[in-house]
Image (spheres, grey):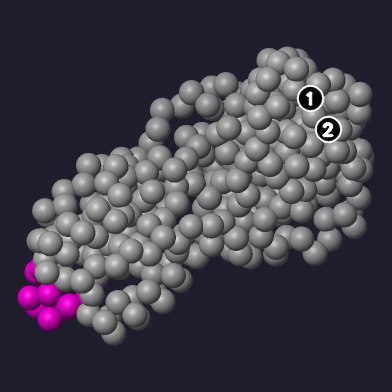
Amino acid sequence: MAKRIAVLTSGGDSPGMNAAIRAVVRCGIWNKLEVYGIERGYEGLINGEFKEMTVSSVSDIMQRGGTVLKTARSQRFMTPEGFQRAVEKLGQFKIDGLGIIGGDGSYRGGLALAKAGKTVVCLPGTIDNDLNCTDFTIGFDTAVNTVLSAIGNIRDTTSSHERSTVIEVMGRHCGDIALYAGLTGGAEAILIPEKPADIDQICETLIKGKNRGKPHSVIIRAEGVEISSADLAKIITEKTGMETKVVVLGYVQRGGSPTARDRLLASRMGCKAVELLLQDGMTSKAVGIRGNDIVAYDLEEALNMPKQYDASIMDLAEILAI
């Protein structure tokens, strides 16, 4: 059973990471553990950037976006020398269990540490919702709401100028941000990597809307879609005769105060991570949510789970966009 644990955040930041840090620290202290924060992810682990955390260390952070522990992408961790130094630092600070909050790359780093004999629990902190071991990741709901707000603002201008707008959103190779925000934002079309885009059908939908007196439209494009936003806008203009602009939302999607849903999810997952680390003989795990249940899978199994795509949501979006 662990006596001294540490927590780090790695890769891209996401709203709710601070709530997860807070939960790990306070649940750890509640259970009489010593808790350390490692700053700047795996890079900070290599450098020995450990600091003991107290109840006060995580006061007034749950509502803040980003991560108070900072984050970084570490090339050194990918080298044998850097990785070995990271393993040695965990031993030097007598860390019995490590909580890692991040996305796919962070999980793979955690798996490497697990195979080196370290006890690791990974929490899904990424706006992309691209980890297959969980229905939702920490930060996804906030990102969707940020995009939803942007759609509303952009639609005002799009309507005033009677034109179409292609809004490009993040997600890497996962289209969930585009799909959920597009459906709830009333987008006329949604393009995601999981489904080949029928641009002719999209243009037909836009023309039908124009013919019934709706001279403006919003098209949501996930960044992982093969056709670029600029090329898509050009084709729409050529085929529909509608002026079409492009808006790339970019990193605005990563920030902002996390929603209640993300704060709750992060808090539940953080405490679940501590519960797992307190178990005797615990092997490394990945925490997730299925339905309303917080679950845990073997870390390697979690990384090998097949990609899931809920086609029914896209079907519904297409029906509602007629």
- Span shown in magenta: 207-217
Residue 269 placement (x, y as % from top left)? 66, 44
Picture mark count = 2
Q: In which quarter of the image is the N terminus?
A: top right
**Quarter of image, res 247:** bottom left
Q: In this view, does 96 lie above or below 308?
A: above
Question: Is residue 248 on the magenta stretch?
Answer: no
What's the residue type where badge 2 is placed? Asn
Q: Quadrant of the C terminus?
A: bottom left
Q: Is residue 192 above or below residue 189?
A: above
Residue at x-position 91% and y-position 38%: 34
Could you tell whether 113 is left or right of 318 in the image? Answer: right
Q: Mark 1 = which residue? A: 86
Residue at x-position 70% and y-position 64%: 63
Pick whichever, 108 or 246, lies toward us.
246
Residue 74 placement (x, y as % from top left)? 68, 33
Residue lying furthest bottom: 160
Residue at x-position 44% and y-position 43%: 172
**Residue 286 visible here:** no
Residue 180 placement (x, y as % from top left)? 38, 56
Could you tell whether 306 is left or right of 283 in the image? Answer: left
- Of circles 2 and 1, which is in front? 2
Q: Is mark 2 on a helix, strand or loop?
A: helix
What's the residue type where badge 1 is placed? Ala
Q: Mark 2 = which residue? A: 47
**Residue 34 visible here:** yes
Q: Distance between the residues labelled 2 and 1?
A: 8 Å
Could you tell whether 130 is left or right of 25 in the image? Answer: left
